[in-house]
Image: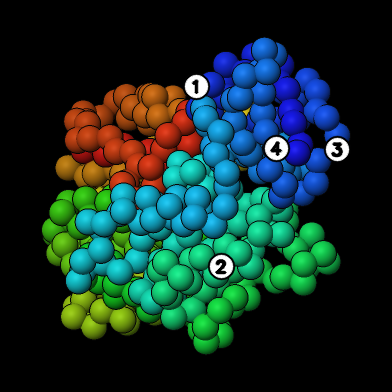
Amino acid sequence: MLKVRLRPSAEGRVRARHPWIFDQSIREQNREGERSEFAVVYDRNNEFLAIGLYDPDSHLRIRVLQHGKPASIDRQWWRTRLEDAVARRATLLDEHTNAFRWIHGENDGWPALVLDRYAHTLVLKLYSSAWLPRLAELSSLIVEVLQPRSLVLRLSRNIQEIARKEFDLMDGQTLTGPKVTEPVAFIESGLRFEADVVRGQKTGFFLDQRENRQRVEKLAAGRHVLNAFSFSGGFSVYAVRGGASSVTDLDISAHALENARRNFRLNPELRSCGHETVQADAFEWLAQNREREFDLIILDPPSLAKREQERAGALRAYRKLAENAIAHLRKGGILVACSCSAHVSAEEFFGTVRESAIASTRKFQELCTTGHPADHPATFPEAHYLKAIYLEF
Ligand code: SAH
């Protein structure tokens, strides 16, 4: 058995149920650990603290599976954990929505693992190579409990090489069921979409923004809408159903905009509204095309701080984006500014957007701020990545 003892500062964090143990937090271990084996973590008095997955490939060396009291981690244990995650989402599935997140990583007790549902297709995304030796066991459990038509594997970039060389696994491959090669159709809030689950960003769609899309729909009536960093046009399709006068999708990726046009075509009842796609760098486009005015602008950039050192730069970028967006808003216009950077706190982000609004010297009113939806719970500080603020000018 691999036994690990921690430095005192790390003991407290693990006792407080934090799921991450970094290499420098480990004071001693009885031997070298192997990828994916269970590490049993003790405090300096030999009291049991946790059991975790050992990951020699990462500085994040142990990902805790079980806190507080010992357990034998067998198939039944995994099964109960999966069923708990499913039970937490029991009310999400209705006839209007068949795409959401079944497992949201450590927040559901499955560190570095995401399981998304798109109708009858499930997409398993792994962010740690520690899961690779357990993949067969894992996928058979998922199939047993959730019975998907197909199960697709996605791999974060940092583990793709190990997966290919040592496990013969490829990003985007179908693990079970009919091979998935085309975008998968699903419905969200009664609207039709497609997700490119094989090649698309994340698992093919940004399921985490569902509730913000619903809010945007309610605000959109009669407005000319700019959806900046639109990806496949999710916010726009909702805005059109909400009665928007026109929508403009702005994204740097031609592939994302092609998907946005497809998502519009999938909802033919929405055709009456003008839909424009603009392929450009949103930072530059917003800084330049000042003659273009809108009544509702959504800013949903990718994470601008992937590391702690990038935090200050990210805040400057958010400020610039918000300032430039506000300059395109007509009187009465609404700004919806989102951030998905875990390294930028909600208060820092909201403060920055409010400062941009104040700097515009225009009158404005804060409508609301929002956080995580129910299928993307956040149970420890670093997990709080998603935030949005709504301002009306
Ligand atoms: N709002 C989307 C998700 C946005 S993801 C939704 O609800 O589905 C971020 C998007 O920003 C991606 O589509 C990516 O292609 C795009 N992007 C990244 N950098 C960009 C840039 N500099 N200018 C415009 N778009 C960019």
Q: What's under tag 2, amino acid-wise? A: Ser
Question: Where's residue 78, x and y in %?
Answer: 51, 53
Q: Is 162 situated above or below 33?
A: below
Q: CA distance from mark 2 to mark 4?
A: 22 Å
| Residue 186 position within the rendered picture, expressed as x and y whole percent measured from the top left | 34, 74
Which is more N-terminal, label 4 or label 1? Answer: 1
Q: Which residue is mark 3?
A: 32
**Count of labels shown?**
4
What amino acid type is highlighted by mark number 1? Answer: Ala
Residue placed farthest to the bottom in the image? Answer: 178
Residue on which disc 2 sits: 139
Residue 345 seen from this side: yes
**Is 168 displayed left or right of 206 in the figure?**
right
Helix, strand or loop under label 2: helix
Q: In x, y percent, where is residue 42? A: 67, 23
Mark 2 touches mark 4? (CB < 8 Å): no
Q: Could you say where residue 368 lies in the image, as x and y percent from the top left?
A: 22, 35
Point out the image quarter for the N terminus: top right
Q: Earlier in the sequence, mark 1 or mark 3?
A: 1
Mark 4 lies on residue:
39
Mark earlier in primary sequence (1, 2): 1
The label shown at residue 120 is none
8 left or right of 196? Answer: right
Question: Mark 1 — residue?
Answer: 16
The label nearer to you, 1 versus 4, is 4
Label 3, residues with CA under 10 Å away: few <14, some 14-19, many ≥20: few
The earlier-in-sequence mark between 3 and 4 is 3
